[in-house]
């Protein structure tokens, strides 16, 4: 298993945006109901684990809301309410919510939850190790999986290898390109979060706006106090745009709730999104029996990962899972999402061909401190970043995954791939899958 750098707001919910009306239209009531019930069951599973294992992780039940401040969005919210009710879940339409912002209307899901995800993960690790039947290895990066004489040979970065009958690819974005070809049927999206200290007493509940780009609000425990988490402003990874003011934009939104609020944390995170917006859970490929996958959680990994764990365990044990059908990972339907598929093909073509043959107009002298650009240096096309002290860091700006040209993220100071979402530090270190190799470093005269 390869674990990427990442963060989360720790929401545990079956409310995944205005999703169920879309799901009913695209998949029908049977699968829409499976999806809803699977997520509701996941909330119960997580609560049961926390209680049984006595995990102290700030777990608390909260109502979840999707709200709109725009009159034009109300029909979408009302359609979503009717869609969810038709699946047997008691969703409510409301014009009043505890969030201290004026709204036009919202859909409410009761009895959802939130927690501290790192404390929960550590509690799971402690529970597993207590059994003395499992070994866990950190800093053991998997770089390849191949069929061996018996089972599968799993190759690790340090040259070691392990043999296993069953393999679960829980690597966020799959590190194997074939035979699953998941890079053809999903993309990655970046979003941003700030943690804010407030003078005002904070509200109950978890909130997500229906407008694009979405903005989310929830509170989190910090000792005896609560802080406000404000997140959103998502975009496709590698998109060429100015990102430098994203955290400031979130701070402006936080100040609508408390003008005296103070930002104490900020982070970004990346999520895998399938073409049909449903996670891929189950067999990796018909050509690799006993290899399983869980990916494409579409920003809702807390509940989706519990669903994946239960489906994959049932498949290994030869049991039937009541929710498996809607998440089938080998389904072909996502490829029929022609519009999004066309966008992905264009982005890959641009990254592999169009951008790579362009000759940079700028040179190293055009790079301000704290910025990165693709420039020409001594006849070579390089990605160069200049830090605040004037030191230059140069890399070959070609993704180590499938060779797309990278773009510079001027907020996080990273090189990001617009094709499949790999990300690298300005020094070239791989930090997000599907890439597993660092970029080629290039020495230039300072």
Image (cartoon, rainbow, N blue to C red):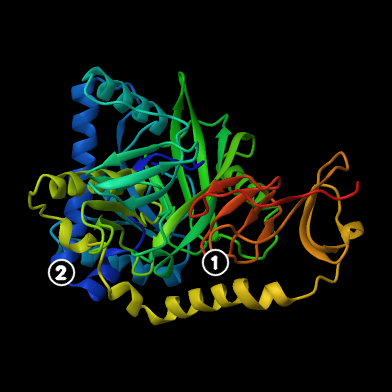
| In this rendering, position of residue 198 left or right of residue 63 | right
Secondary structure of the residue carrying tag 2 is helix
Residue on which the image places disc 1: 419
Q: Quadrant of residue 75?
A: bottom left
Q: Quadrant of residue 399?
A: bottom right
Q: Residue reaching furthest left?
A: 319
Q: Position of residue 85 (x, y in %)?
A: 17, 61
- Note whether residue 90 is visible: no
For residue 39, above or below residue 342: above
For residue 155, above or below residue 220: below
| In this rendering, position of residue 189 left or right of residue 167 | right
Q: Position of residue 56 (x, y in %)?
A: 32, 21
Q: Residues within 10 Å of mark 1 (few under 14, many from 20)?
A: many
Residue on which the image places disc 2: 29
Q: Residue at x 10, y 54 (%)?
A: 322
* Residue in front for this viewpoint, 53 or 144: 144
Q: Quadrant of residue 164?
A: top left
Which quadrant of the rendered structure holds the N terminus? top left
Q: Earlier in the sequence, mark 1 or mark 2?
A: 2
Q: Residue at x 41, y 43 (%)?
A: 155
């Amino acid at each position: 298993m390869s674990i990427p750098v990442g963060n989360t707001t720790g929401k545990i919910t079956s409310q995944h945006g205005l999703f169920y009306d879309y799901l009913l239209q695209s998949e029908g009531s049977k699968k829409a109901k499976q999806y809803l019930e699977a997520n509701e069951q996941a909330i119960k599973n997580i609560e049961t684990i926390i209680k049984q294992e006595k995990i102290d992780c700030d777990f608390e039940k909260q109502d979840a809301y999707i709200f709109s401040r725009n009159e034009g969005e109300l029909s979408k919210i009302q359609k979503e309410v009717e869609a969810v009710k038709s699946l047997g879940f008691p969703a409510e339409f409301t014009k009043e919510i505890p969030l201290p912002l004026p709204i036009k209307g919202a859909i409410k899901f009761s009895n959802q939850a939130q927690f501290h995800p790192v404390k929960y993960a550590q509690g799971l690790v402690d529970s597993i190790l207590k059994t003395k039947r499992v070994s866990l290895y950190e800093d053991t990066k998997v770089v390849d999986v191949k069929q061996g004489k018996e089972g599968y040979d799993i190759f690790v970065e340090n040259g070691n290898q392990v043999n296993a009958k069953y393999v679960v690819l829980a690597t966020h974005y799959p590190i194997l390109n074939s035979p699953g070809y998941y890079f053809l049927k999903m993309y990655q999206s970046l979003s941003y979060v700030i943690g804010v200290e407030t003078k005002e007493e904070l509200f109950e509940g978890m909130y997500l706006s229906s407008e694009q780009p979405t903005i989310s609000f929830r509170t989190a425990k910090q000792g005896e106090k609560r802080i406000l988490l404000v997140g959103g402003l998502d975009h496709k990874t590698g998109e060429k745009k100015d990102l430098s003011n994203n955290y400031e934009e979130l701070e402006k939104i936080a100040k609508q709730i408390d003008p005296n609020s103070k930002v104490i944390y900020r982070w970004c995170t990346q999520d895998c999104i399938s073409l049909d917006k449903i996670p891929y859970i189950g067999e990796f490929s018909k050509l690799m029996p006993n290899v399983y996958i869980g990916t494409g959680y579409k920003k809702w990994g807390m509940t989706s990962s519990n669903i994946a764990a239960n489906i994959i365990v049932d498949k290994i044990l030869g049991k039937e899972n009541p929710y498996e059908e809607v998440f089938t990972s080998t389904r072909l339907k996502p490829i029929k999402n022609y519009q999004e598929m066309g966008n992905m093909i264009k982005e890959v073509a641009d990254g592999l061909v169009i951008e790579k043959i362009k000759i940079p107009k700028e040179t190293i002298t055009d790079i301000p401190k704290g910025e990165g650009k693709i420039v020409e240096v001594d006849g070579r096309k390089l990605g160069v970043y200049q830090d605040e002290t004037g030191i230059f860091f140069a890399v070959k700006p070609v993704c180590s995954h499938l060779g797309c040209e990278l773009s510079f993220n001027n907020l996080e100071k990273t090189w990001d791939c617009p094709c499949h979402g790999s990300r690298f530090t300005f020094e070239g270190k791989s930090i997000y899958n599907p890439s597993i190799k660092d970029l080629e470093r290039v020495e230039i005269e300072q």
